[in-house]
Image (spheres, grey):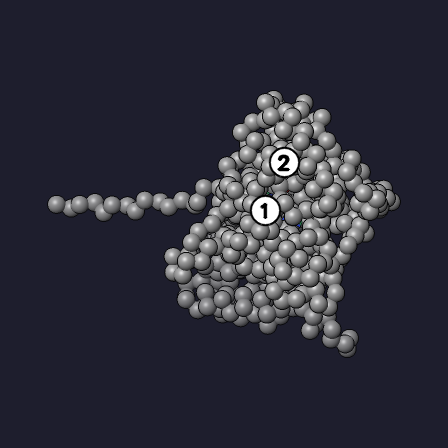
C-alpha cells in the first residue's frame, strides 16, 4: 500500500522574538542609514561587543535586585565548560567591560555607540519583546552636565528629523551615592512606619532596594508612596548645581521638559542625571528612550574611576512611531530591472552579462531569474520600483543592443547599443556616478 509521506511540522520563532522582512526590514535599513549620519554628526564611533557575556557582569552592573537580573535574563550554563553566560539584556554593562578591559579611556574620553539585539524574558505585548533592538549611545569619561545636555539635544534632533512630534522629555536627578544612601535610610524608616500598606514586592525590596518601591504600580500604595521622603530633600550643593546647569542648557536649546521626581529607572548603576523620552502614541509601552549618568560603573568593573553618561533607544518602538510619521520610506526599489525572453539560451546569458556590466557602474540592477511570460516579467519589473526596464529578446541579442523602457512617466522606449547602455542609464541617475567617473577631469 502506498503510504503518504508525513509532512514535517512547521517550526516557529521563539516567543517574543520577531523576524524582520519586506517593508519593515527596508524601514529598519533606511532608519539605520539615517542614524549613522546622525551619530557621526555628534562624533560618536561604533563599538561592537559580544551578545554573550559572563552572567556576573550583569549581576554586578545592573544590580542583583532589579527586574532585569531577578526575572528577565536569558542565562544558562555552557554545558561544554560550565561557564555561566547571559544573552545581553542591555549594552551599557558590556561596553563598560570592554572599556575597562582594553583601557579605552587611556587616551581621553570617548563617544561611542552600538546597535543590535538585546534579550529580556518579559511578557510579550505591543512594544515589548524578548528579543528587541537598541541603539545605545555612551559618552565615557565626561563629567557633564554639558555632555548630558548634548545627549538630550541630540535626541530631540533625531525626533525632529524623523518627524516625531508627540515625544516628551522627563528628567530627574538621583544625586550622589552618599545622598542616595541618606535618602535610602529615610525611605526605609518611612516605609517601616507604613509596613501594613506594603505589598509582597515592596516588603521584599524594603531593605535591598527601597528606591524601587517608589516605582510601584500598585494603586493601594500610591498615596503612601507619594508622601514618602524625596531625594531632593537630601541633595547637596554639587548635585543641585549639576542638575540646575543641565536645565539651563536645555532651556537655552529650547527643549521642553518636566522634572519627574519619581523617575528612578530600572537599572541600579545610575547617579545624578536620568531621563526618558515618552510618547502617548504607542499604548502601554510608551518609553522610546531612557538613559542617564553612571559615574560609578567603570570603577565597579575594576577600572579607574571615570564618569559616564548614555542612553538607549528601543528600535521596535521607534519604528512603530516612524511608520506613523512616514518620514522614512522602507519600500524596496532598484534602478533597473532586466527582462529577457529569447528563444535561444544565449539571450538569458546576454542579459546576465549586461546586468553585471550595469552594476559595475554603480547601478542597482535586478535580473529576472526563473523565466515566465513577458507580461509577468514586466509586472515584476514594475513592482520592483525600478525606474527602467532593460528588455532583451532575440532581436536585441542579434543586434547586440537592448531596449530601454522607462517605467515611470511617459517617455518613449529606445533601442541602445549594448556598449552604450550603462552610460545612457548613468545619464538618468547622475547622483549615482561612481567616484572614478565624477573625479575624471573634464576633457
Ligand atoms: P532601558 O530603559 O532598560 O535602558 O532600555 C532602553 C529602551 O529600550 C527603553 O526605553 C525601550 O524603548 C526599550 N526596551 C526596553 N525593554 C524592551 C522590550 N522588552 N521590548 C522592546 N523594547 C524595549 C537601558 O537599557 C540602558 N542600558 C540605557 C542606558 C545606556 N543608560 C545609560 N546608557
Query: In the picture provided, is 212 more to the left or to the right than 151?
Result: left
Query: In the picture provided, is 256 more to the left or to the right than 189?
Result: right
Q: Nearer the viewer, residue 302 or 45?
A: 302
Q: Is residue 23 above or below residue 394?
A: above
Q: CA distance from mark 2 to mark 1?
A: 13 Å
Instruction: Say if residue 76 shows up in the picture.
Output: yes
Residue in the image at 60% along x and 23% along y: 197
Q: Quadrant of the N terminus?
A: top left
Q: Which residue is mark 1?
A: 63
Q: Residue 395 location, x and y as percent?
A: 50, 65
First in sequence, mark 2 or 1: give its number. Answer: 1
Residue in the image at 62% along x and 57% along y: 301
Q: Nearer the viewer, residue 425 or 24?
A: 24
Label at residue 210:
2
Q: Residue 154 location, x and y as percent?
A: 75, 49
Residue in the image at 56% along x and 31% along y: 203
What is the crowding at mark 2: few (fewer than 14 residues within 10 Å), some, or many (at least 20)?
Answer: many
Which residue is at the far left?
1
Query: In the picture provided, is 373 more to the left or to the right than 336?
Result: left
Q: Quadrant of residue 277?
A: top right
Amino acid at each position: 500500500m502506498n503510504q503518504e509521506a508525513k509532512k514535517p511540522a512547521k517550526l516557529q520563532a521563539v516567543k517574543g522574538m520577531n523576524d524582520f522582512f519586506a517593508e519593515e526590514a527596508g524601514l529598519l535599513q533606511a532608519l539605520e542609514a539615517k542614524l549613522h549620519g546622525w551619530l557621526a554628526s555628534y562624533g560618536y564611533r561604533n563599538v561592537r561587543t559580544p551578545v554573550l557575556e559572563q552572567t556576573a557582569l550583569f549581576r554586578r552592573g545592573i544590580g542583583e535586585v532589579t527586574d532585569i537580573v531577578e526575572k528577565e535574563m536569558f542565562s544558562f550554563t555552557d554545558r561544554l565548560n560550565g561557564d555561566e553566560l547571559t544573552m545581553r539584556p542591555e549594552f551599557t554593562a558590556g561596553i563598560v567591560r570592554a572599556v575597562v578591559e582594553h583601557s579605552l579611556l587611556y587616551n581621553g574620553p570617548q563617544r561611542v555607540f552600538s546597535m543590535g539585539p538585546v534579550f529580556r524574558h518579559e511578557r510579550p505585548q505591543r512594544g515589548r519583546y524578548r528579543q528587541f533592538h537598541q541603539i545605545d549611545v555612551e559618552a565615557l569619561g565626561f563629567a557633564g552636565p554639558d555632555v548630558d545636555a548634548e545627549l538630550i539635544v541630540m535626541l530631540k534632533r533625531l525626533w525632529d528629523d524623523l518627524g516625531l512630534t508627540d515625544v516628551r522629555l522627563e528628567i530627574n536627578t538621583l544625586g550622589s551615592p552618599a545622598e542616595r544612601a541618606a535618602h535610602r535610610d529615610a525611605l526605609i524608616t518611612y516605609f517601616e512606619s507604613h509596613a501594613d500598606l506594603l505589598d509582597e514586592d515592596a516588603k521584599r525590596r524594603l531593605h535591598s532596594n527601597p528606591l524601587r518601591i517608589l516605582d510601584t504600580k500598585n494603586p493601594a500604595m500610591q498615596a503612601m508612596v507619594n508622601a514618602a521622603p524625596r531625594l531632593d530633600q537630601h541633595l547637596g550643593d554639587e548635585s543641585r548645581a549639576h542638575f540646575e546647569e543641565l536645565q539651563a542648557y536645555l532651556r537655552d536649546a529650547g527643549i521642553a521638559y518636566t522634572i519627574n521626581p519619581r523617575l528612578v529607572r530600572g537599572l541600579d548603576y545610575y547617579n545624578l542625571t536620568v531621563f526618558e523620552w515618552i510618547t502617548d502614541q504607542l499604548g502601554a509601552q510608551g518609553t522610546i528612550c531612557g538613559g542617564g549618568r553612571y559615574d560609578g560603573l567603570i570603577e565597579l568593573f575594576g577600572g579607574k574611576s571615570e564618569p559616564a553618561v548614555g542612553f538607549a533607544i528601543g528600535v521596535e518602538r521607534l519604528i512603530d512611531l516612524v511608520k506613523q510619521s512616514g518620514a522614512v520610506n522602507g519600500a524596496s526599489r532598484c534602478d533597473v530591472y532586466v527582462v529577457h525572453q529569447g528563444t535561444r539560451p544565449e539571450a538569458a546569458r546576454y542579459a546576465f552579462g549586461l546586468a553585471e556590466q550595469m552594476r559595475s557602474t554603480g547601478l542597482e540592477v535586478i535580473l529576472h531569474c526563473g523565466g515566465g511570460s513577458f507580461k509577468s516579467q514586466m509586472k515584476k519589473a514594475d513592482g520592483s520600483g525600478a525606474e527602467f526596464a532593460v528588455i532583451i529578446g532575440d532581436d536585441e541579442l542579434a543586434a547586440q543592443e537592448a531596449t530601454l523602457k522607462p517605467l515611470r512617466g511617459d517617455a518613449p522606449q529606445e533601442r541602445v547599443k549594448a556598449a552604450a547602455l550603462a552610460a545612457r542609464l548613468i545619464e538618468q541617475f547622475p547622483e549615482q556616478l561612481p567616484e572614478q567617473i565624477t573625479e575624471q577631469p573634464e576633457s
